[in-house]
Image (spheres, grey):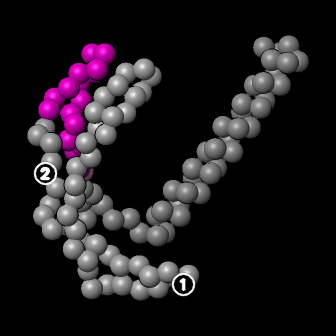
Amino acid sequence: MKLTYRGVSYEYNPSVTETVEAKVAGKYRGLDWRFHNLKKPPVLQPPANLTYRGVTYTNRPVVTTKPESTDVSVKTQARWLMLNKTKAVRNRAASMLNRTAHEVGLV
């Protein structure tokens, strides 16, 4: 397929993915649907170390898994949310007071 982007023509050949219909199917709002599974897994690009404007990066992102030992209780999460909310309110109040002081001419 011949495509053009900003005056540059190029050939685009989308990859063909072979699928197999799964046994899971149903009806949603009057239309039939069915899951499709891949016949074989897709081939991934080989990892490459790239540089853009002096910053190095890779085309294969690093997957970070969270260790299970860092599970936080609901009580601790609620406490953090409350502290962050309080901190945001204080920062907003300080910002408004500072802005008012500049407008009045105290600073």
Position above or below: 47 against 7: below
Q: Crowdedness of circle 2 by 10 Å Cα count: few (<14), some, many (20+)?
A: few
Residue at image mark 2: 43
When asked about the image quadrant of residue 30, the answer is bottom right
* Nearest to N terminus: mark 1 or mark 2: 1
Q: Which mark identifies residue 95?
A: none
Position above or below: 11 against 63: above
> From the viewer's perspective, is 76 left or right of 40?
right
Position above or below: 42 against 55: below
User: Mark 1 or mark 2, which is nearer to you?
Assistant: 1
When asked about the image quadrant of residue 60, the answer is top left
For the point 83% across and 25% down, the residue is 100
- Label 1 and label 2: CA atoms lie apart by 36 Å
Nearer to me, 67 or 17: 17
Residue at image mark 1: 30
Residue 71 locus on image (x, y percent): 33, 65
At mark 1, the secondary structure is loop
**Magenta span of residues:** 48-63
Nearer to me, 100 or 35: 35
